[in-house]
Amino acid sequence: MTTTYRYFSKSVWLAMGLLAIGLLVVLPILHLGVDKHSSLYVSSYAITLIGKIMCYAILALAMDLVWGYAGILSLGHGVFFALGGYAFGMYLMRGIGADGVYHANVPDFMVFLDWKTLPWFWHGTEHFAYSLLLVVLVPGLLALMFGFFAFRSRIKGVYLSIITQALTFAAMLLFFRNETGFGGNNGFTDFKRVLGYSITAPETRVAIYMLTGLVLLGALLLGRYIVTSKYGRVLAAIRDAESRVMFCGYNPVSYKLFIWTLSAVLSGIAGALYVPQVGIINPSEMSPANSIEIAIWTAVGGRATLIGPILGAVLVNAAKSYLTVSFPDYWLFFLGALFIVVTLYLPHGLMGLLSALRRKITGGWK
Amino acid sequence: MNTPVTENNETQDGGALTGLAHFVQPGELDASHGPVLYLDDITVSFDGFRALNQLSLTIDNGELRCIIGPNGAGKTTMMDVITGKTRADSGTAFFGQTLDLTKMNEAKIVQSGIGRKFQKPTVFEQHSVFENLELAMQADRSVWATLFARLDSESRDRIADTLKLIRLQDSADRPAGLLSHGQKQWLEIGMLLIQRPKLLLLDEPVAGMTDEETDRTAELFLSLAGKHSLMVVEHDMAFVAQIAKKVTVLHEGSVLAEGSLDQVQNNKRVIEVYLGR
Amino acid sequence: MTRSAIYLCCIVLALLSLPARAALDAGQLSKLAADDNDAKVAVVKYLASHPSPEAEAVLTAMDNDALYQNQGRLLIVRGDQAIDAATLQALGPVPDSAESIIVNNRLRGAVQGALSAFKLFSSDLATRLKAARDVKQDPRPEQLPLIQQALAKETNAEIHQDLLLAQASIQISSSNEAERLAAVKILGATNNPEVRTKLADMLIQNNGQYNEASPVVRAAAQQALKSIDLRISLARAAASLFSGLSLGSVLLLAALGLAITYGVMGVINMAHGELLMVGAYATYFVQGWFKTHLPQHFDWYVLAALPIAFLAAAGVGMVMERLVIRRLYGRPLETLLATWGISLILIQLARVSFGAQNVDVANPSWLSGGIEIIQDVVLPWNRIIILGFSMAVLVFMSFLLSRTRLGLFMRAVTQNRAMAGALGVPTGTVDTLAFGLGAGIAGLGGVALSQISNVGPDMGQGYIVDSFMVVVLGGVGQIAGTVYAALGLGIVNKLLESWSGAVIAKIVVLVFIILFIQKRPQGLFALKGRSVD
């Protein structure tokens, strides 16, 4: 996890390129262009699952930027993810139009609350571009405000983690209320269309899926640019010796604030991509347990490695999809044990394990 | 070092062209009229304990000042106040004529030209020696600038010069955490110099150094004096004897004595404090 | 005896008795034999307003379903003997044709109301006091004569006051203005919400006419209302203050253990809530054991659960410390994640062993019920006792920390581990014991929680954020700060709750804490130090 780590070696670039082609070109073709009964056919379940996991991977990457590179362990990233999801969900809800159960021109849950008109914060959400703006602005502004207060008063370490947990907990309580205007318990669901296309059509699915893949790739390249820049080195220096950085003339508050806000925006985008693929967003996305899971994806893969967290998100969520179906009683045992084992025995995650193995084989120092 | 002359006819290292009227730049050091550092009546207390008690002290431009005093005399707290790490309960602290240190944060104070070396050498252990110097080098420290920063050849040369000065040119690519204690001290001094500060605060700079390294440090400090102002806190009296022109003795948070090393060593009150009553 | 003979007998007796004892009007009484419930109620009211031994006997008989009628004539049945209801003369065995008089609920209410008024004349002080309370709470106009008679005789000041209130509550509807005025003046001291409504009613205008015509009475009513409302709002405020203190004491129990593990030792334990859960399930377990083995001493199972819950949670805590936390000292973020993992495992263990549903933990009798400070404002015993219990735990803990060798060692180890080790303090053992102590206190908290909230696998999750907030707000390592923060948070939360609803209150409090930490990052009671990092 030192800055002498090379981003990335040739073989990693090659593997990433192949994987990108496989996921972004081959799989969509196998889904759209192959007969359903063929053994090569990739089901829509698989596409949705992979798309969902890619959203989680973006989220893990966002976590790595703040935790791995700035030493800020956020236990509240779920709130940014969910806010992004809700922002885009509002657009999708408006897209239902009068096709809801009550055939009203407000979303069904508002009919239930006996609201005749849309609350002010729903205005304009029928516009795709505006909702995209919200996806970026809402989590970004919340993070900016929260971070400004937190970093300015030099809250760090465990304190900060606990407060971020309180943040997401408070947001969850707020969104659980029906009167808040986001569907309460049930959140948003039953989406019909996006940009006029049916949301369940295979072509729409694949389009969102490919977009997710591209965003993930873009986030990875952006992350790589940031952590290899001088900014990234200052950030890592803040993580290791904050007061020394201050006495080099840098103001750590603005450095932390930038990466924190960027990370929140990335999380929000991940949430916005997640909602149309999964078809639902509700306040449980903001539960503290969900947010802390993001940290374990990152830790499993290896902090401050960028690809490690992606790997971690993929592996843990694949395991989750398998275990919660096949051995539902054991999933929490597995997850709990993962937290313990990774922190005790794999402080640098799988990436650390890999490079340790490579070092053993080549016998080299680096 | 080539010191560019700024628009207001004030040289980079603070030496003013006396007698000429000049504009005072907001946020810039103006040491044209006397001392570079001016502490007056500073008091700091922690839960009733007075770490600094109405301390007053001035450092002249280009001066090399040694600060000595028993443990708990307030040396480190004084540096904390100057660098903005601790806020004074009362009193004033000015850098030059215009910069009120009590109203600035740590980063601003550094940017205005005060560099500090801590008692315990703190370098960025995960970064290479080269990167340590790169981060410390005087440059635009805004987020935006660092995001798009590229090292130009002039900066590379400066880093290379500094590496040579601190004799770490062979370790440039090693992580700083792997350096010896003395090397870390030198690296930190190098990081301080590459900031091009006008005033250097050095807290026990030769602790953990070999005799040879100590001699070289003394040499370096003497060569810096004149161009920079230095404030050195040191317990090693041999080292102090090597470099000191003027010595200040702190005791219980205020100045006990000030003068040449001989003068303070023969001061009755100083003897009392050091040898007990 | 034939039926006609009895009949004859009765008539003779009735004719004989009437002139002699005119206490009960047989004509009135005979309406009780009819099927008309309204008429029956009217008779009961009549009886109530004409106190006499006969009337009391009739009403008591009705209340015990011992009043019979035989061909329009009323009999009180005692064993197999009948007594004439109007005269209380013995009539011999109960005739076969006698039918029981049906007392429906409405009638029974009236009977009991009347009877309670009769108790106003009991020679037993406690009985009289209770009766006076009853009439004060539920005054009936027909009781007025009785109340007035009782007032004339009553010597006990407390009973006298209650009777005055009861009288006033009835006379407020009097047609006599002077009586109304006197009544209204007295009624400032009532807590009865119905009477309050009547008073408020007097001040309502209807078509330009006040319901109460006299301005003097209206002014007095206004005065009385004011003093009633003041008292009620004081009682309400006391009640919400109490529920705030109660929530505070729960938070305190949850946070005290954390004050040791996090505050003193610096270990961030996300499984702290699950240690509460362990304590609560231990209580459930002890309850089950008492049910099967010591059902006669069931009431005391909570006391037996205390040491067991303490030991169970402490045991879990010490195992955690030995196996996991020990290897992570000095790495708080990793500790946080690992202990979160432990909490997941504990939750799932609880689910697998006790089921995912909440289990039933009953209050023993001495923890049920409560004190009613005014009508509808009850302070439950379990909450009162938990408030006291949390204080006891606090005392126990500060005693351990300040007066015992373990406490001394703990403080030494946290201040300077190396030095303490050099002086021969077994630092490893001290860590384990200290963590066990913090966990055990959480277990005690679990016992208390089992008495006031649901016991289930997820119960601990709800407390973790709150209890960290308490410790953070109070200042790390500050037991006194923890106490003030817990009680303060509890009270603020409850006051906000009554004003804005529970969820908003919780959010407001969280936002407040976040803002507060901006101002004082070291908490309420932080010591300023020379160097913080």
Image (cartoon, rainbow, N blue to C red):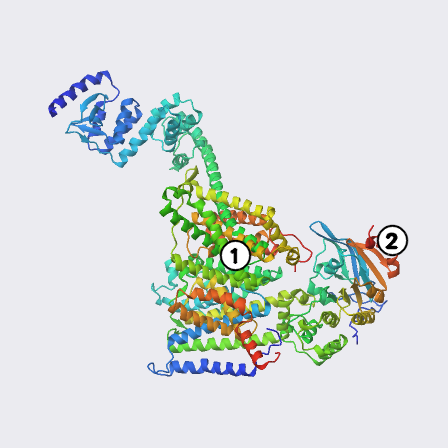
Left or right for C73, reference C463: left
* C29 up-or-down from A191: above or below: above
Mark 1 near mark 2, Cβ–Cβ under 8 Å? no
Say whether residue B147 is visible: yes
Distance from disc 1 to disc 2, alpha carbons, whole Å, reads 60 Å
Q: Quadrant of residue A31?
A: bottom left
Residue lying at the far front in this picture: please name it: C424
SS at badge 2: helix
| Residues packed near mark 1 inside 10 Å, few (<14), some (14 to 19) or many (20 plus) | many
User: Label 1 is placed on what type of residue?
Assistant: Met
SS at badge 1: helix
Instruction: Report the chain holding disc 1.
Output: C
* C265 up-or-down from A316: above or below: above
| Residues packed near mark 2 inside 10 Å, few (<14), some (14 to 19) or many (20 plus) | few
Q: Quadrant of residue A73?
A: bottom right
Q: Residue at x 13, y 21 (%)?
A: C8
Q: Residue at x 85, y 62 (%)?
A: B246
- Which label number is shown at residue B268? 2
Pinpoint residue C377: horizontal percent, then vertical percent: 43, 40
The count of marks equals: 2
Pinpoint residue A187: horizontal percent, then vertical percent: 41, 63
* A297 up-or-down from C237: above or below: below
Which residue has dot 1 on it? C318
Pinpoint residue A175: horizontal percent, then vertical percent: 45, 59
Instruction: Report the chain holding disc 2.
Output: B
In this orientation, which residue lies closer to the viewer: C293 or A307?
A: C293
Query: Where the N terminus of chain C falls, by quadrant?
Result: top left
- Which label number is shown at residue C256? none
Residue lying at the far top in this picture: please name it: C20
